Image (cartoon, rainbow, N blue to C red):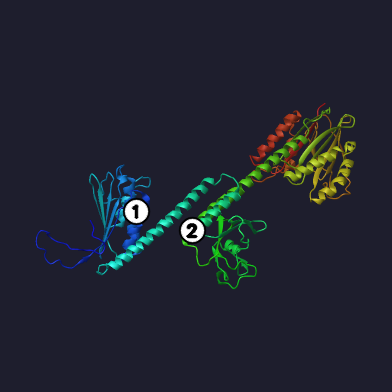
Amino acid sequence: MLPAAGAQAHVNANASEPAPDPGPTIHLNGWRASPGCDFGPVRSATRSARAFMEACGLSETEGAAWELALTEAGNNAVQHATEAGRKLPIEFEVLCDPRSVEVRIVDHTPGFDWPEDPTLPEPDAESGRGLFLIRTLVDESRYFRHDSANLLVLRRARETPVEECAPASREELAAQLEECDAALTNMTSELASSYESLTALFRYSAELGTGGDLKDFAGRLVGDLLLVTGADHAVVRLFRQEPQRLELFLTAPPGDAVPPEVLVPHKNVCTECLALATRQDIWFKPGHPEGEGEPAPGTTASLAGICHPFFVGDKPVGTVSLVRDAEEQPFTAAQISLLHTFVDFLGIQITNARLLEERTQALLVERELQIASEIQRALLPDALPRCPPFVLAASAEAARQVGGDFYDARPAGDGGLFLVIADVMGKGVPAAFFASMLRNAVRCLQSLYEHPGRLLTKLNTGLCDDLSRVDMFATVQVAYLDARRATVITASAGHSPLIVCSAEGRAELVSNAGLPLGIEPDTVYEETRLPLSPGAWALLYTDGLTEARAPDGTLFGEDRLAAWLAQPDQLKQPAPARRKDLLRTLADYREGTPLSDDETFILVCHRP
């Protein structure tokens, strides 16, 4: 057993013979503790052992090394204790003399063979690091095994030997004991507070990502934060991006009479804004915020506290301000650490709530786009009307869920057929809306189907103001197929040229394009009459076909489209087969590149 602190020990060669001259006196300082076999008591004991060693003159570096070695040894004693050994305490004894420190640890484990020169285990090894660490931190280690208990003896020389000193007096020992009692009392209080904090944090961890009312979660968290930090009031503000501002989210406790503007100004900038801009905690106190002059009129000059900005990643979320009515009670470092930890949970929950809201909105928008796409599909003809001797095939593919292209085919005249194809500037919902409006307007002009030029003139007059008001325009091509005369009458408002191919394979681009709809209200559109003899083809299309891009960016172009229409081996194919071939040709050209624009076309073939 070790002598009591400050006792003297004499080294005797043989205790049964008369003692020779004892030589110089060696002053020993001893410390002993018997914590229960659990990690918490062992950790407290190792801290006390370090405090004792540093009181004996060891440096902080030496004390930290000894604390780590004792912690590893104590944890091993807890981890490997037998079932009976868990009911017995682990014994720590520390002996300090002017030149060295010796530690003895008694455990109740099955014991193990202590290696003479332990090496660092492999990274995936489950054990062995503690022994290596202990052996690295001390000069000498011995391990004695016994049936009922084992003894580990560790020794290490002091960095700087100290001069002999006189034993402590009774009064000094009493003062030291009183300090130890005070430290234990503070430690007990701190452990109780830590338990409350950990309980709250575990509760909030379980709630993260589960949804629920964000304000309720934040109110409970801030209420707990007031309790563990001893603050009187709290104010939470959230950062909004557009326009950039801080909005009041909540004050605590509920119904708090403290006004929202609890912070005094700092260099003509509000403290919360400064904290968020600098990403640093800002302290404030009555009368002199950070020592910068007098408080502004109307500010709460009697309050003191701290403003903590919080972020998730690099994105600012908001600020939390803790306030005390009494300046004489400053926040401790532990309380500030709790503030940071609690607010981190709040920031994560707020971000999760915002992401959930954004996801919900995105799902709503996606569903609305699906409905809009279904409506737009419903606006296209279910089947193209029959118009012998002409045979038709058509296709419409949107670059997005909805687009600005559309086509229509309506019976007109004496067995004839009216065709329209249009491309509203832009993509997405706005373009789809105006495409729908344009389709309905065209259907209202049924009396002009046999006169495409007059129809476009009247259509432009009616829609120009609406299109101009939103800075939009539309390109349109209309055509009347005269079945009796085997001709086509066309007019174009800025649209892609019509391609006509004879039965012999001669392709021609017919361009009579006037201004797009929505540019000039008084535009008059001209008509072009063309024969469609037996075996001839005509192609009406939007610029999405000619602007299809290969992976290297090369456009498909009008020449390549005309060459496709004039392929000799395809001229006698039925219109539906050629429709499939054109879609396949465009897809092969893009080689998997997504559509950059809507692709819509109508194929017309004269089959005798």
- Residue beneath label 2, please? 337
- Residue beneath label 1, please? 71
Residue type marked 2: Ser
- From the top left corner, tell me how far across and down residue 319 is, in percent: 58, 58
Relative to 215, does residue 4 appear above or below in the rendering?
Answer: below
Relative to 181, does residue 590 appear above or below in the rendering?
Answer: above
As measured in the structure, the alpha-carbon distance from the residue carrying label 1 to the one carrying label 2 is 24 Å
341 vs 101, left or right, is right
Query: Split into 4 quadrants, where in the image is the N terminus?
Result: bottom left
- Give whichever of 459, 482 is nearer the camera: 459
- From the top left corner, tell me how far across and down residue 59 is, in percent: 33, 65
The local crowd at label 1, few if under 14, some if 14 to 19, many if 20 or more residues have their Cα within 10 Å, is many
200 vs 474, left or right, is left
Secondary structure of the residue carrying tag 1 is: helix
294 vs 84, left or right, is right
Q: Residue furthest left?
A: 17
Name the quadrant containing residue 53. Answer: bottom left
Secondary structure of the residue carrying tag 2 is: helix
Q: Residue furthest top?
A: 608
- Give whichever of 68, 331 is nearer the camera: 331
The local crowd at label 2, few if under 14, some if 14 to 19, many if 20 or more residues have their Cα within 10 Å, is few
First reached walking from the N terminus: tag 1 or tag 2: 1
- From the top left corner, tell me how far across and down residue 492 is, in percent: 83, 42
- x 74%, y 37%: residue: 563
Relative to 360, does residue 487 appear above or below in the rendering?
Answer: above
Q: Residue furthest bottom?
A: 293
- From the top left corner, tell me how far across and down residue 451 is, in percent: 89, 38
